[in-house]
Image (cartoon, rainbow, N blue to C red):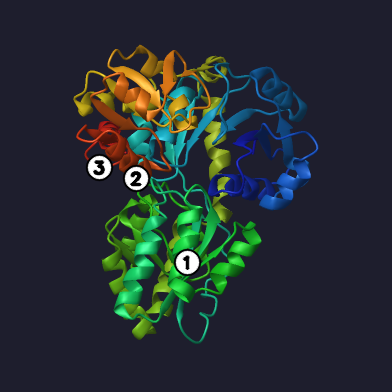
Amino acid sequence: MPTALSLHGDYGISGVSTWGARMATRTRDAENTWHLGVIGLPRGDEKRWADAHGAPVERVHAINHGNTALGNACDAIAADVIVPNDAMLDDGPLPRPAIAVCHGADIGWRTRIERLAGACGGLVAVAPHVLAAMRDAFRADAQAWVQPCGIDILSDVPLAIPDGKPLRLAWIGRFDRTEKRVHDVIALAEALETRGADAVLHVVGDGPARGEVVAAAERLGPRLTVGRPCRPACIRSLLTASHGVVMTSATEGWPTIAMEGMAIGRPVFATAGCGGAADAIARADAGVVVDVGDMHAMAGHIAALAADRRNLTAMGERAIRLVRAECDADDMVERWAEIVRAVLLAPDSGSRSRGSVSALLPTPYERLIAVAVARSGGHRVAIYGAGAHTDRFARAIGQNDAVMCVVDDRPSRDEIGSTPVVTPEGAMQMGIDAVVCSSDAWEDRLAERAAAWAPGLPVVRLYERGTGWQALRDEFAL
């Protein structure tokens, strides 16, 4: 394989970063290999990052922000190609030909792909639905591939399913309410309790909704337990001790946790939002797929299996056959070698190396806020929430004549961009006629508060079906 520099952000352990680590590990003895560039990682922290992800430390490189630093890193390892993943790159030309990798079909990934499209000679999507959602960001003749990340498969026989009761199910991911929908795990635990099912849930992760999950665990007792994020090796141990994997996501690419569970013969109980995993599970009968949010249906399937577990092993056997055929990491390295060579051998590879990272204007997030403001019907609209989420819209709300202010319960700054930040009382004194909630973590809470301090006014949620989020998802088929 030509030498590739796979770029990642220093965001903690994720399916994206563990995929990069797996590639680096599998090519560590090759002359030309896969290196990991971690944008924003402090120098001296390479070993910490490598140990956390199970990567060879000699293949991990701390890179400062900026394309000059990126160019220096490419020179140091004689990189032939750059593979941006979830790293946020500065605008401007890239120092090498590049291949964009899209791991999801949500607005965040759409934003990354739009920024990268002009600088990349090809697109790799982890599942067909991801490619369909992102393909139009590239020129029509750009090369594109579907390639799941891949997983290590240690045996063609499922690891022994734990004896005894109750049925133990693992949910692992970021504690958020928009994409992973961790609140649905609480609803699932409650539905299992109502049914008297002999099943328990162990939830592992962290994120903005952690407090909500911990409070539910205290209320539900052993039915729902909570653990902290752990390293990849610990995750496999956790899955081995479980009877199955639960996923409640609204949107995914081809989630690694599903692959991890299936690779050791654990069935997956998933929602239709789980992307490539949901499609594969349904096709191979390697678990159960229900509609997003339908925890009563999922609880019914789990309760039936808890009462009669004979089908668990058969599901696990089908799961291993599926990932062996479609997601085996043994095939991943050679497949990526072919992709890299195809991009480097393309007639315009030299010109693509001089392409620029830049955002189409307006960005997807800016289009999202514009749609939500328009749907509010207001002419004097307040944006509720003055955090990092609203910072993404600073330019858009400053240019939108209908937006009067940003509201925060306890303002810590005077303005975002050119838009004033005020208290709820200040917003009402300005004569606002609608409120748009701006948070991907606390949307429900903000909507409840807005209804209290702005009684009778329309309150629009960005991420609720039927509002701006759904309109944007429809636009890109996300």
Q: What is the quadrant of residue 64 in the picture?
A: top right
Any mark on residue 465, and which? 3
Give the residue drawn at x 40%, y 49%: 177
Query: Is disc 2 placed on a helix, strand or loop?
Result: helix
Query: Mark 3, residues whose alpha carbon is within 10 Å: few (<14), some, or many (≥20)?
Result: few
Q: Quadrant of the N terminus?
A: top right
Reading the image, the residue beneath label 1 is: 217
Residue 182 in picture, x, y percent from top left: 42, 55
**What SS does tag 3 mark?**
loop
Residue 436, percent from left and from top: 31, 30
Q: Which mark is residue 40?
A: none
Whether 127 is drawn above or below 228: the answer is: above
Q: CA distance from mark 3 to mark 2?
A: 13 Å
Going from the N terminus, do you reach mark 3 or mark 2 first? 2
Q: Amino acid at mark 3?
A: Arg
**Camera-nearest residue between 410 and 58:** 410
Q: How many marks?
A: 3
- The amino acid beneath tag 1 is Ala
To which residue does mark 2 refer?
444
Q: Nearer the viewer, residue 450 or 222?
A: 450
Residue at position x 18%, y 25% from top? 377
Question: Residue 290, how many percent across, how many down?
Answer: 28, 61
Q: Nearer the viewer, mark 3 or mark 1?
A: 1
Which one is in front, 462 or 41?
462
Decide: marks 3, 1 in contact (CB < 8 A)?
no
